[in-house]
Image (cartoon, grey):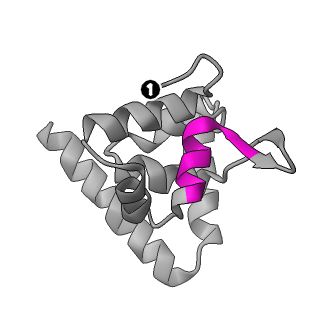
Amino acid sequence: MTTPQQWPAGQLLQHAREREGLSKAEAARRSRLSESWWRRLETGINIRDGKKIPITPTPEALAKAAQAVNLPINQVLEAAGLAPERENPEDLQAEAAQLLKALPMSLQREAVAYLRGLTVGSRQG
């Protein structure tokens, strides 16, 4: 059950997890994150020395969590305030090219294969 103080990305993850019929442990396993980290992603807080501290998850952790519960990655990143705010398609394409170039060659091939899959999927839908 979501709470009024729960952060928007956590609400999305929790609703999706519940919709998929997954426990927190199973969602964590699917995402390859620890169960304690999954709980923090849903609540948006970490408790240290009895104090509630807002979490600062990486885009990678949020992407893993989104995929584990079948949510669009960008939707979760947006809810967490981490989505690119580029409106100009040329800027977005330039950023994508820059990110791709920064990857090792083996990951570039993987990223291109993933993008090709997205392209095929968008033509079928």
| x 55%, y 47%: residue | 39
Q: Residues within 10 Å of mark 1 (few under 14, many from 20)?
A: few
Q: Residue 84's image quarter?
A: top right
| Secondary structure at numbered mark 1 | loop
Q: Can residue 83 be seen in the rendering of this structure? A: no
Mark 1, residue position: 1
Q: Is residue 37 magenta?
A: yes
Please state which of residues 73 and 57 is positioned toward the viewer in this rendering.
57
77 displayed left or right of 121: right
Asked if 76 appears above or below 11 in the picture, the reply is below
Magenta segment, prevailing SS (helix, strand or loop):
helix
**Residue stretch in magenta:** 36-46
Above or below, 39 against 13 in this view is below
Near-viewer residue (91 or 117): 117
Q: From the viewer's perspective, is 24 left or right of 40? A: left
Magenta-drawn stretch contains 19: no
Q: Residue at x 38, y 54 (%)?
A: 27
**Residue 73 visible from this viewpoint:** yes
How far from the left and from the top, in percent, is residue 91?
A: 63, 39
Residue drawn at the location 29% of the way across and 59% of the way down: 116
The answer to whether residue 41 is left or right of residue 73 is right
Q: Is residue 20 placed above or below 101 in the rendered structure?
A: above
- Residue at 49%, 24% in the rendered image: 2
- Residue 17, horizontal then vertical, whole percent: 35, 41
Q: Name the amino acid type tagged 1.
A: Met
Closer-to-camera residue (81/16) = 16
